[in-house]
Image: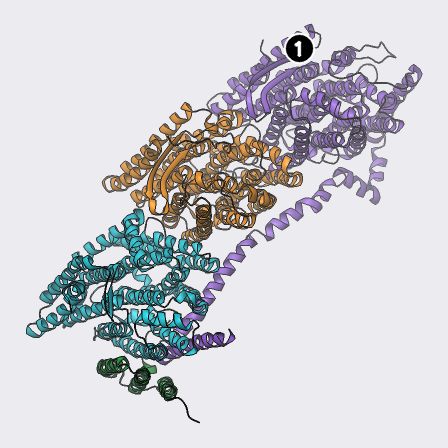
């Protein structure tokens, strides 16, 4: 079978995205959840790259740059918060963080 | 002189007494109350004379526009013609006498002025009723007297039983009134007016004899009359109405108000003539009532209840007469009945007071010696009620009815026999009462004798209930027709089909004999063989029958079971208003939704993510799937 | 302009009495009373000046408000509004008087709310712009909500919420209808306006008209109230303070009736014809159902509340039997019911002040102690059972004789309602004033202030019953008034 | 970049510059007052910068940005709301946190992000704006480190926001992959040419919708809202409720317009379902909720549902309605949060309904304000909320969306219940129960702000014409 490269790329991105999604769902450790989200973001980035190669424009790459930057920022803030949370809960289990509900 | 004053004066004094409350002292109250009636009685006489001078031409006067809407007009308008004059005279004169009597009777009651306020109010309303020129105003008087009767029956409000009796009276009559209201609606629908004369004329042109519409109307009017006049099937309230003070019973539940039905039918006689069916119904109802009530009167122990049942039965006579088309006869009987029944009630009242408010006849007796004055007047009254021949007014009026029940166009043998049976019964219960009260040995001692203020009215009424008969004598003896002639401009003369002196003689003879027979039986029963009678009465079947009759043929029980209890039951089960349950249910449902939703806000992050993902999947699948659909 | 003044007197009075309360409670009472009396005087003068106003528009005022939507401050007064306003200011003044001793907490705020409700009601009776109508319609709710919710009896919050939510639900449906009408008219005439007189005779399909009419109708049936939308009323009436009950029964319910007469029938004549029988049926059901419930109650105020359900049934019956007699009867009924039921609530309130219970099983034999109150109660009880010579009779008689022409059987049942009315009315007298006196304390009879209130009510109900002609002249049918000019 | 570009971007530039400078300020010397004053100044300057920007409208800065009346209007709205929130913030943080200065920095940044959103006409600017907004929000939400609920909220928001922007991005990628354009018009035209809507693009829109929906907090992406509102500092909650949602909504409108969204019935249906679901979910959740912060969160969910109804009407009245409703809604929710702020003490926020028992008799003025705000949320006359809701219903009727309207009516009735529940609590006579233990701060600035807001609220409720005309002629441009 020979698939059109764009389709293949998008498919790959899609698979990555879904994998990330699944691991967000099944992981309880907040750090891993964060990582999985990063995977999803990068999947999106990949999709952009593929798309831009398909159209032969640079927009996709630029977007990917932005995504990288934003992901970095997010992780940094995220880790800070997780640290905070760990100080209070003494655990990284996200399910423990459920003081607010109803 | 302005005849509008006739009802106005009693109203005025009623207002004064009501506002005056406890500030006016008793003498003043009595003076105002009686004086006002005396005044309006005088004016009534004057008015009567005027009417007579214009040989029966009615006096009309419009006071003010009550309501006038788009062609419909009802004014505060009065009309004094021969018929209403008769009623007005009876009401004012008898009313005046009763008031005088009452000043003594109620002397040591703490609500003295309230009593007389209501009495005056009643007289005023009654006068409006009989003087009204249109049916709406008549309805006002009609309900007004109902109100006063309610107020006065329940006058001694501390005892719930009285309150019950009063409510019963009001509600039962109200049932009749609604029938009358329908009649009004129908009349307006067909004739476009409620002005009595207008209605009568329009009706005469509008309907052929026996037209269903007019029959319906007449029947409905009859319904109203039946309610007020305590005829079958709405008679049940009157005996209980005796809970009121005796003057009230005399005035309202004997002399005047209960005859309003008679007045109504006489007033609208044109319609009844157009509706033979309705007229027959009137006669039948009258006949049945007079027998049933007579039987009940036979077995009562309470003296006032006897009189009450006898009133019902006498009004039955009037209805019978009306049904037979003997209009003037009915009115004549009304007049005499007003006199002797008022007399009986008040003398009974005198007895009751004398015996310290003892009403049970079996605890009375031997009063012939102790209360001679009362004895004589009571005797006259009883005689007149039992229609002893020749000397009593009752004889002439009742005899006329009995004869016409046979001979009149609308009459028949059946009616005649009923009427005779009634005569027999009347004689029996009247003198049973009479003997029980005044003969035998005294069972309760008399603690004070009635004073002049009580006795004088009694004497006057005694005279009246003797002489009043002589204004109308049958063909056979004297043939005086002052009364029917006087009524001629309003009420047509009765068509007599079997014009025969011989037959009339027989009829009179039979009726006279029967009343004597009745008296005789009463005598045997009470005086001669009380022992045997008592044994006879103790027989179980008889006991049951007696009980049933005493309870007025158990009509109350039937109505309770059929109407009252179901209504109360229904209203009780729904007292919390089931409709509201719908809304509370709705609120519950909302709360349930809240709880369900609140569960989803578990506070656990992954749960939220799950939510997002599910949403995403849902949206994606919907969109894409739909896309392939198209 | 005078109409605006009527409104502003109330609003100004509201603010003033709130402010005044901080200085002296008495002052604030007087301010409120003064404002209402001033309005009363003005309106009475207008009435005297236009004794037979029924047929034309007396005053109009119009100013643009939200031109973007074609919304204008448009007030007009005809006979109907005139009568309603007389009633409003009269009962309003009495309401102030009756709460003179009853209300002692937050008097200023109380009077603020009281006058604010009245202002809202006045607006409802005057406005000729549908948006403005809805505006006032909602505006009455909040102060009424506070009146019940703050100064009410034990269960006040429940009652207040229920009242608020019911009316709001109805109102929103009406809003939908108003807007739909607005757009339909715009589509036809290409003019965007909420003006009553422009929206009259808007041509539309039958089905549409029926739907829109239902939208209005529901709102008004809730207010009226008609079975099955009535259940807010007993709670609200029972829990409200006396003045609140008086205003609820006397005025708020009337806004529903007024709405039907002013908006539903003129705006959707065909649809109203179509639904007439249904509405009359609802009315009759209301008469009987309300009567039965009233008979079953033991809480005096609740009992009276259900009697108003029964009485307003007559209004519904009359309004939809489409003839002059019934129409006039409805108008008189609105007034008579306002007076008689208001009076009964006042008596219930005065009783409550004395014996601190509303349960009629704990009363009885009070006549001996308070004869004046008793006789007043007697008069109004008789009024409520429709005794001739008192206002309600005139109303009910006209309604019935009118509806008889429209539907015979419904009228028969409505008339049977009068018997039921007799039953429950007499029950009041029996349980409260007759029977033997069981309580030990000695009750004071009506004092001067209460006497003033009650007597004025008695006089009015008697006048209404014996000489209703002025009212009838003023309230002739208001539908032929097509020839209309803004003055 | 030409001069008039510069001018028309004035507000944005001012604010971002302000952010940088305030960072430096903090670096130089920590002083709450100075930073506060400076950021106030920054907002004022940004607002004034709108005036010259008006000269050039409509002005596009290809490919990323467009400054037309719509975006300027919303910029102004955002700036004003930000300014008001700032006014309310000072005391709140003064009492609670030792390091307050960065708060202002973050607030400025977040506002900048929102402003970028409202002027963006391109995926890239959209994304940038969104992320500037989000990331500064992470910081803001978790700002009060002392409170554990605060950073729990932060974490939740962070993860979910990242997740949703992943969806958004992927959606963008798909759209881009098919159309080859990232600017809205381009996409619109491309779709016009192809005529029908291919799977990938549809999937892309769906995924973008998830990203957008998350920020708007509509069902089923609403679950974060209550927790975040509860955990975040009150001013931040106000910010989230108003500015971030508003900004996102503006982008949505613009995007929808450019791609002619209302031509795709399926999209319409999905949004309709979401709208109904949001209304019901929001109101049901709030029905018996005891925590006022959460109530406000839920009610905001419901309100987004209402707004969607107007959005779906697809008529011009609808867009006007949204703008007006946004204004009313901004005023109202900021006002409500403002009340919470002034009523809160340094130890504890006044957040349970019970805290407000009998408040009217102790702090009548604040209670009246709160009542006004709640009534406006419930849409009762004399308040802006009423006119707003009226406007929305009008749009709905105009578009004959009877079903949605009935849903709206039902929900307004349900909503009424919990609003008047709070009001009733405030008007309870104090003797009926022990008053709240909270000693409110009642700062002067706060009170003045509230007065201002109430004035606005009533003003818009009684005489909305001016605002309407403004909105109306602004809408002419974009439709």
Q: Which residue is mark 1?
A: B48
- What residue do we see at 86% from left, 11% from top? B477
Q: Which chain is purple?
A: B
For chain A, the rendered hue is green
Q: Is residue D157 left or right of residue B472?
A: left
Name the secondary structure under disc 1.
helix
Q: Nearer the viewer, residue B621 or C30?
A: B621
Q: Quadrant of residue D202?
A: bottom left
Q: Where is residue B125 shown, x and y percent of the image?
A: 60, 23
Q: Which chain is cyan?
A: D
Q: Nearer the viewer, residue B147 or C73?
A: C73
Q: Nearer the viewer, residue B48 or D350?
A: D350
Q: Furthest residue to the front?
A: D193
Q: Please identify the quadrant where the N terminus of chain D is shown.
A: bottom left
Q: Which chain is orange?
A: C
Q: Badge 1 sits on which subunit?
A: B
Q: In this picture, is A41 found above or below B309? A: below
Q: Furthest residue to the top?
A: B53
């Amino acid at each position: 079978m020979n698939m059109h490269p764009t389709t293949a790329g998008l498919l790959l991105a899609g698979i990555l995205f879904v994998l990330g999604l699944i691991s967000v769902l099944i992981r309880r450790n907040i750090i891993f959840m964060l990582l999985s989200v990063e995977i999803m973001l990068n999947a999106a980035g990949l999709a952009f790259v593929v798309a831009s190669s398909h159209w032969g424009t640079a927009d996709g790459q630029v977007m990917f740059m932005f995504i990288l930057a934003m992901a970095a920022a997010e992780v940094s803030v995220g880790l800070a918060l997780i640290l905070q949370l760990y100080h209070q809960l003494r655990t990284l289990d996200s399910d423990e963080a459920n003081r607010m509900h109803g | 002189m302005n005849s509008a004053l006739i009802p106005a004066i009693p109203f005025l004094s009623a207002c004064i007494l009501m506002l005056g409350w406890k500030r006016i002292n008793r003498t003043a109250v009595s003076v105002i109350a009686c004086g006002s009636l005396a005044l309006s009685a005088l004016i009534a006489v004057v008015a009567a004379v005027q009417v007579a001078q214009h040989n029966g031409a009615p006096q009309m006067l419009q006071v003010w526009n009550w309501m006038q809407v788009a062609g419909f007009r009802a004014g505060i308008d009065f009309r004094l013609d021969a018929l209403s004059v008769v009623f007005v005279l009876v009401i004012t004169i008898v009313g005046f006498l009763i008031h005088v009597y009452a000043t003594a009777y109620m002397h040591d009651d703490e609500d003295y002025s309230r009593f007389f306020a209501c009495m005056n109010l009643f007289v005023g309303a009654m006068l409006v009723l009989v003087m009204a020129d249109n049916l709406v105003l008549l309805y006002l008087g009609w309900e007004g007297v109902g109100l006063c009767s309610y107020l006065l029956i329940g006058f001694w409000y501390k005892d719930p039983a009285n309150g019950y009796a009063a409510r019963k009276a009001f509600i039962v009559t109200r049932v009749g009134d609604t029938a009358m209201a329908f009649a009004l609606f129908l009349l307006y629908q067909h004739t476009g007016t409620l002005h009595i004369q207008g209605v009568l004329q329009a009706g005469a042109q509008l309907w052929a004899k026996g037209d269903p519409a007019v029959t319906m109307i007449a029947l409905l009017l009859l319904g109203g009359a039946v309610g007020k006049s305590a005829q079958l099937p709405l008679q049940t309230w009157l005996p209980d109405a005796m809970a009121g003070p005796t003057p009230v019973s005399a005035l309202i539940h004997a002399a005047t108000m209960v005859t309003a039905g008679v007045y109504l039918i006489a007033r609208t006689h044109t319609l009844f003539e157009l509706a033979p069916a309705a007229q027959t119904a009137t006669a039948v109802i009258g006949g049945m009532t007079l027998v049933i009530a007579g039987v009940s009167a036979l077995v009562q122990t309470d003296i006032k209840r006897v009189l009450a049942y006898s009133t019902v039965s006498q009004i039955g006579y009037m209805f019978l007469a009306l049904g037979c088309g003997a209009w003037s006869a009915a009115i004549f009987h009304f007049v005499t009945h007003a006199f002797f029944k008022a007399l009986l009630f008040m003398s009974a009242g005198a007895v009751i007071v004398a015996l310290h408010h003892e009403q049970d006849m079996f605890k009375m007796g031997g009063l012939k010696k102790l209360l001679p004055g009362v004895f004589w007047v009571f005797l006259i009254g009883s005689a007149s009620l039992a229609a002893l021949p020749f000397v009593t007014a009752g004889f002439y009026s009742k005899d006329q009815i009995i004869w016409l029940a046979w001979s009149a166009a609308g009459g028949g043998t059946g009616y005649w026999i009923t009427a005779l049976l009634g005569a027999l019964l009347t004689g029996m219960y009247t003198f049973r009462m009479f003997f029980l009260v005044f003969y035998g040995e005294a069972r309760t001692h008399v603690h004070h004798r009635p004073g002049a203020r009580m006795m004088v009215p009694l004497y006057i009424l005694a005279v009246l209930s003797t002489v009043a008969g002589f204004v109308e004598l049958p063909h056979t003896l004297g043939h005086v027709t002052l009364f029917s002639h006087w009524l001629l401009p309003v009420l047509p003369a009765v068509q007599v089909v079997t014009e025969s002196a011989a037959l009339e003689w027989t009829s009179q003879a039979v009726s006279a004999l029967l009343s004597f027979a009745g008296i005789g039986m009463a005598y045997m029963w009470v005086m001669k063989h009380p022992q045997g009678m008592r044994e006879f009465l103790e027989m179980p079947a008889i006991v049951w029958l007696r009980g049933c009759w005493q309870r007025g043929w158990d009509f109350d029980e039937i109505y309770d079971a059929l109407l009252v209890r179901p209504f109360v039951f229904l209203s009780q089960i729904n007292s919390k208003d089931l409709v509201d349950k719908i809304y509370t249910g709705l609120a519950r449902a909302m709360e349930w939704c809240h709880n369900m939703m609140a569960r989803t806000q578990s506070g656990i992050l992954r749960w939220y993510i799950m939510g997002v993902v599910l949403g995403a999947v849902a949206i994606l699948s919907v969109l894409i799937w739909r896309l392939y659909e198209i | 302009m005078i109409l605006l003044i009527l409104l502003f007197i109330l609003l100004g009075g509201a603010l003033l009495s709130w402010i005044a309360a901080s200085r002296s409670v008495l002052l604030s009472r007087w301010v409120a009373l003064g404002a209402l009396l001033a309005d009363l005087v003005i309106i009475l003068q207008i009435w005297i000046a236009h004794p037979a106003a029924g047929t034309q528009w007396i005053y109009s005022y119009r100013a643009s408000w939200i031109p973007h939507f074609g919304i204008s401050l448009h007030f007009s007064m005809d006979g109907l509004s005139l009568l309603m306003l007389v009633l409003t200011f009269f009962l309003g003044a009495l309401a102030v008087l009756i709460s003179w001793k009853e209300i002692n907490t937050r008097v200023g705020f109380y009077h603020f709310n009281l006058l604010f409700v009245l202002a809202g009601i006045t607006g409802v009776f005057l406005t000729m712009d549908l948006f403005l109508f809805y505006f006032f319609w909602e505006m009455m709710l909040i102060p009424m909500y506070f009146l019940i919710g703050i100064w009410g009896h034990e269960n006040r919050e429940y009652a207040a919420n229920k009242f608020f939510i019911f009316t709001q639900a109805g109102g929103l449906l009406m809003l939908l209808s108003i807007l739909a009408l607005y757009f339909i008219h715009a589509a036809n005439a290409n003019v965007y306006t909420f003006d009553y007189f422009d929206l009259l005779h808007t041509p539309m399909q039958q089905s549409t008209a029926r739907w829109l009419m239902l939208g209005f109708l529901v709102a008004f049936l809730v207010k009226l109230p008609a079975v099955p939308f009535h259940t807010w009323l007993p709670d609200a009436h029972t829990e409200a303070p006396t003045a609140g009950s008086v205003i609820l029964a006397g005025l708020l319910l009337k806004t529903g009736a007024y709405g039907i007469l002013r908006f539903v029938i003129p705006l959707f004549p065909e649809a109203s014809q179509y639904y007439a029988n249904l509405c009359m049926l609802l009315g009759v059901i209301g008469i009987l159902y309300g009567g039965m419930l009233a008979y079953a109650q033991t809480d005096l105020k609740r009992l009276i509340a259900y009697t108003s359900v029964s009485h307003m049934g007559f209004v519904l019956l009359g309004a939809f039997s489409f003839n002059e007699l019934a129409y006039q009867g409805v108008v008189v009924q609105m007034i008579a019911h306002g007076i008689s039921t208001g009076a009964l609530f006042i008596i219930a309130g005065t009783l409550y002040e004395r014996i601190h219970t509303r349960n009629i099983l704990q009363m009885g034999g009070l006549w001996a102690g308070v004869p004046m109150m008793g006789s007043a109660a007697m008069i109004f009880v008789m009024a409520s059972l429709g005794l001739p010579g008192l206002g309600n009779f005139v109303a009910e008689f006209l309604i019935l004789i009118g509806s008889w022409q429209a539907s015979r059987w419904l009228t028969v049942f409505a008339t049977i309602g009068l018997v039921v009315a007799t039953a429950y009315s007499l029950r009041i007298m029996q349980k409260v004033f007759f029977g033997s006196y069981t309580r030990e304390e000695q009750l004071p009879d009506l004092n001067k202030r209460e006497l003033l209130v009650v007597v004025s009510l008695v006089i009015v109900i008697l006048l209404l019953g014996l000489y209703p002609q002025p009212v009838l002249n003023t309230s002739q049918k208001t539908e032929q008034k097509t020839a209309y000019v803004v003055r | 970049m030409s001069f008039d570009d510069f001018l028309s971007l004035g507000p944005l530039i001012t604010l971002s510059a302000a952010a940088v400078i305030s960072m430096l300020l903090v670096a130089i010397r920590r002083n709450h007052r100075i930073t506060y004053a400076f950021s106030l100044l920054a907002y004022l300057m940004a607002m004034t910068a709108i005036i010259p920007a008006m000269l050039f409208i409509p002005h596009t800065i290809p490919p990323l940005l467009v400054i037309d009346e719509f975006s300027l209007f919303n910029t102004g709205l955002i700036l004003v709301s930000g300014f008001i929130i700032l006014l309310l913030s000072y005391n709140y943080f003064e009492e609670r946190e030792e390091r307050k200065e960065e708060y202002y920095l973050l607030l400025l940044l977040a506002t900048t992000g929102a402003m970028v959103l409202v002027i963006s006409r391109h995926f890239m600017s959209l994304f940038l704006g969104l992320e500037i907004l989000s990331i500064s929000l992470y910081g803001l939400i978790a700002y009060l480190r002392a409170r554990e609920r605060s950073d729990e909220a932060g974490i939740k928001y962070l993860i979910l926001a990242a997740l949703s922007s992943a969806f958004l991005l992927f959606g963008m990628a798909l759209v881009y992959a098919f159309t080859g354009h990232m600017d809205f018009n381009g996409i619109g035209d491309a779709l016009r040419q192809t005529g029908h809507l291919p799977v990938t693009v549809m999937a892309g829109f769906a995924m973008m919708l998830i990203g957008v929906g998350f920020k708007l907090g509509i069902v089923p992406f609403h679950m974060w809202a209550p927790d975040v509102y509860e955990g975040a500092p009150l001013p931040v909650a106000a910010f989230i409720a108003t500015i971030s949602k508003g900004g996102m909504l503006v982008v949505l409108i613009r995007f929808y317009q450019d791609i002619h969204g209302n031509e795709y019935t399926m999209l319409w249906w999905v949004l309709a379902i979401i709208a109904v679901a949001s209304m019901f979910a929001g109101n049901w959740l709030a029905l018996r909720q005891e925590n006022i912060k959460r109530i406000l969160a839920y009610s905001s969910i419901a309100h987004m549902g209402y707004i969607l109804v107007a959005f779906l009407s697809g008529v011009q009245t609808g867009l006007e309605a949204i703008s007006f409703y946004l204004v009313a809604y901004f005023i109202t929710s900021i006002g409500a949060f403002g009340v919470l702020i002034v009523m809160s003490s340094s130890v504890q926020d006044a957040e349970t309904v019970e805290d407000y028992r009998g408040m009217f008799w102790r702090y009548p003025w604040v209670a009246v304000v709160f009542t006004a705000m709640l009534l406006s949320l419930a849409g009762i006359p004399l308040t802006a909320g009423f006119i707003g809701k009226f406007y929305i219903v009008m749009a709905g009727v105009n578009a004959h969306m009877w079903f949605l309207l009935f849903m709206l009516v039902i929900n307004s009735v349900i909503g009424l219940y919990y609003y008047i529940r709070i009001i009733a609590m405030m008007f309870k006579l104090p003797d009926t129960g022990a008053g709240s233990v909270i000693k409110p701060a009642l700062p002067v600035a706060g009170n003045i702000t509230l007065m201002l807001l109430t004035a606005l609220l009533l003003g818009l409720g009684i005489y909305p014409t001016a605002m309407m005309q403004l909105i109306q002629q602004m809408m002419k441009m974009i439709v």
